[in-house]
Image (spheres, grey):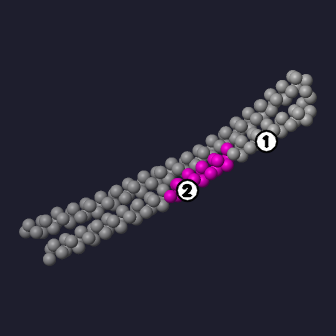
């Protein structure tokens, strides 16, 4: 009579262990999915901030260009002169370069964050599969062990 009771306890232990493996994998998968979501949100935020920074740089460039023109006019230099126009072109070119740099860096960072999100998504699927396979495998091995003990 003691052997069937021990087999029942062993079966419950095997089931509990298998279920624990499944829950652990499910929790890991959830964590990976949440990390993927955070990476996607970060990617969107990087692009949004790059747009804002580009707009600010453009406005500051225009303001600075206006100040340059005012300084030339105040010093008696014609705003249509080659010197004034050249300075404005240099300023506009510098601002355009800065905007391109800002957007290029943001696009790269956003792309990397999206790749990270994809990787986390794959890890979530893999964790879920591994947990299910581990739980089923553990249950099968436990069942085989119980069967052998019952013989």
Identify whether 150 is placed above or below 30.
below
Residue at the (57%, 53%) spot, across then down: 112
- Quadrant where the C terminus is found in the figure: bottom left
Q: Is residue 108 magenta?
A: yes
| Disc with the residue nearer the chain's start (1 vs 2) | 1
Q: Which mark is residue 93?
A: 1
Q: Residues within 10 Å of mark 1 (few under 14, many from 20)?
A: few
Q: Residues within 10 Å of mark 2 (few under 14, many from 20)?
A: some
Q: CA distance from mark 1 to mark 2?
A: 33 Å
The quarter of the displayed image where residue 85 is located: top right
Q: Which residue is mark 2?
A: 115
Q: Position of residue 4 (x, y in %)?
A: 12, 69
Residue at the (71%, 37%) spot, across then down: 57
The secondary structure that most of the magenta stretch takes on is helix
Residue at the (8%, 67%) spot, across then down: 2
Residue at the (41%, 61%) spot, across then down: 127
Furthest-left residue in view? 1
Furthest-front residue in view? 83
Q: Is residue 131 magenta?
A: no
* Residue 80 appears in the figure: no
Write down the region rendered in magenta: 102-119
Q: Position of residue 95 (x, y in %)?
A: 75, 39
* Residue 39 appears in the figure: yes
In this rendering, would 142 be left or right of 26?
Answer: left
Q: Position of residue 15 (x, y in %)?
A: 25, 63
């Amino acid at each position: 009579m003691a052997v069937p009771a021990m087999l029942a306890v062993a079966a419950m232990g095997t089931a509990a262990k298998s279920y624990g493996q499944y829950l652990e994998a499910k929790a890991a998968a959830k964590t990976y999915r949440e990390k993927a979501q955070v990476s996607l949100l970060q990617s969107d935020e990087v692009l949004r901030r790059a747009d804002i920074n580009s707009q600010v740089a453009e406005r500051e460039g225009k303001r600075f260009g206006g100040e340059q023109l005012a300084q030339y006019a105040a010093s008696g230099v014609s705003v249509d002169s080659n010197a004034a126009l050249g300075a404005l072109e240099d300023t506009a070119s510098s601002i355009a370069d800065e905007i391109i740099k800002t957007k290029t860096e943001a696009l790269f960072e956003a792309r990397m964050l999206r790749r990270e999100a994809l990787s986390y998504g794959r890890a979530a699927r893999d964790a879920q599969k591994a947990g299910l396979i581990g739980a089923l495998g553990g249950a099968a091995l436990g069942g085989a062990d119980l069967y052998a003990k019952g013989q």
